[in-house]
Image (tube, rainbow, N blue to C red):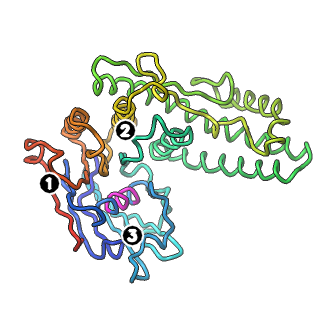
Amino acid sequence: MSLTVSSISFRNYRNLAALELCPSAGVTVLVGPNAVGKTNTVEALQYVTSGQSFRRPSPSELIAPDAVEASVAARLEGDGRVIDVEMRVTPQSRKFLRNGKPCRGADLTGTLLSVLFCPDDLSLVKGSASRRRGELDAFGAQANVGYRKVLSNYTRSVEQRNRLLKDGCDDALLDAWDESVALGGATLLHHRLNLFRRLSGIVSEVYAEVASGESLSCTYVPSVEGAEAGMGRDDLRDLMLSQMRDRRADDVRRAQTLVGPHRDDVVFAIDGRDARSFGSQGQQRSVALAWKMAEVRLCEDLLGERPLLLLDDVMSELDASRRSCVTRFVEGGIQTIITTTNLSYFDDELLSSVKVVPYGAES
């Protein structure tokens, strides 16, 4: 049995002054008009499972207007385990506790993975390359405890090198930073390529279920030419370092680092045609849906546990066939929190088997 959220309580968290929610171990539907706290609940669940929020707010934004602090506390249960997780917020900071002991937000990674699907995710195909990289990295940071640190270190090293390029520096100093950036980039790229190799195959399988009769291919496009899954970190570092030095004049002229995993992309093709250029809106949304469902399946493969699935107001953005696909998927025994403004998006059979929690202004 996987861990599930058995309860979550709020105190002065955004517009949730005082609320306790006890989700079902299966599907819980939060229903109510806009601006009553449904998405805030989803955000809080993401915080206590991953240590971060898809909204990237400042701490002060998490506190109710008339309050000086806020808190969210959740209990996770399963396999004979009970884990209490809490986030305490002041205008200057977020502090996390696990079973009463202070911890970093990053330390929550791996306790209970969560997969969030919100309307912004539907732009996965047609959005920017950074959107696709970010999706892969956000999942990797939860699935692998070292991934987030590798990503953070690499991002900082690229930012520092870019500052040096902008301000001007001698070749000797750039040589030293090239070594550092290439090592960090190779480490991140090694993690990313291996994760993508496992995830992309599942995405293609799920897409075939979502869009019967169509085939989807997913290709990772590295800016480091010749990089591919299966290469060792040292080989990737040497490859990246060589290309950074070959392109240094371009880097200096543009004052930015042009080679590395921060410049990579993911390309989707449906029946051999680029989904971004030729895919219909429905096809592009099917790709995003397949990606999220694949993340859930890969969580089970990697950790042997099912994640928490958070579906924030996506049913209104999907047509009937894709809503049906989501319904069949969540009926497979995954703890799922769904927010909606309208129960008519769900069939009567599903509603008879889920926990429906009305949200109103008093929430």
The residue carrying pointer 2 sits among few (fewer than 14), some (14 to 19) or many (20 or more) residues within 10 Å by Cα, namely many
The residue wearing badge 1 is 355
The residue wearing badge 2 is 292
Q: Which residue is drawn at 38% across and 27% down?
A: 202
The residue carrying pointer 3 sits among few (fewer than 14), some (14 to 19) or many (20 or more) residues within 10 Å by Cα, namely few
Q: Which residue is drawn at 31% across and 63% down?
A: 74
CB atoms at circles 3 and 1 under 8 Å apart? Answer: no
In this picture, residue 274 sits left or right of residue 254: left
- Quarter of the picture containing the N terminus is top left
Foreground of the two, 288 or 93: 288
User: With respect to residue 357, does 65 lie above or below?
Assistant: below
* Earlier sequence position, callout 3 versus callout 1: 3
- Quarter of the picture containing the C terminus is bottom left
User: With respect to residue 239, does 91 lie above or below?
Assistant: below
In the rendered image, residue 284, in percent from the top left (x then y), is placed at: 39, 32
* Earlier sequence position, callout 1 versus callout 2: 2
Q: Is residue 21 visible?
A: yes
Which secondary structure, mark 3?
loop
Which secondary structure, mark 1?
strand
Q: Can residue 301 be seen in this view?
A: no
In the rendered image, residue 124, in percent from the top left (x then y), is placed at: 45, 38
User: With respect to residue 294, does 83 lie above or below?
Assistant: below
In the rendered image, residue 270, in percent from the top left (x then y), is placed at: 41, 21
46 in magenta = yes
Three-letter code, disc 3: Gly
Three-letter code, disc 2: Lys
Foreground of the two, 115 or 272: 272
In this picture, residue 122 sits left or right of residue 348: right
The residue wearing badge 3 is 100
Q: Please report the bounds of the magenta region as a residue range.
A: 41-47
292 in magenta = no
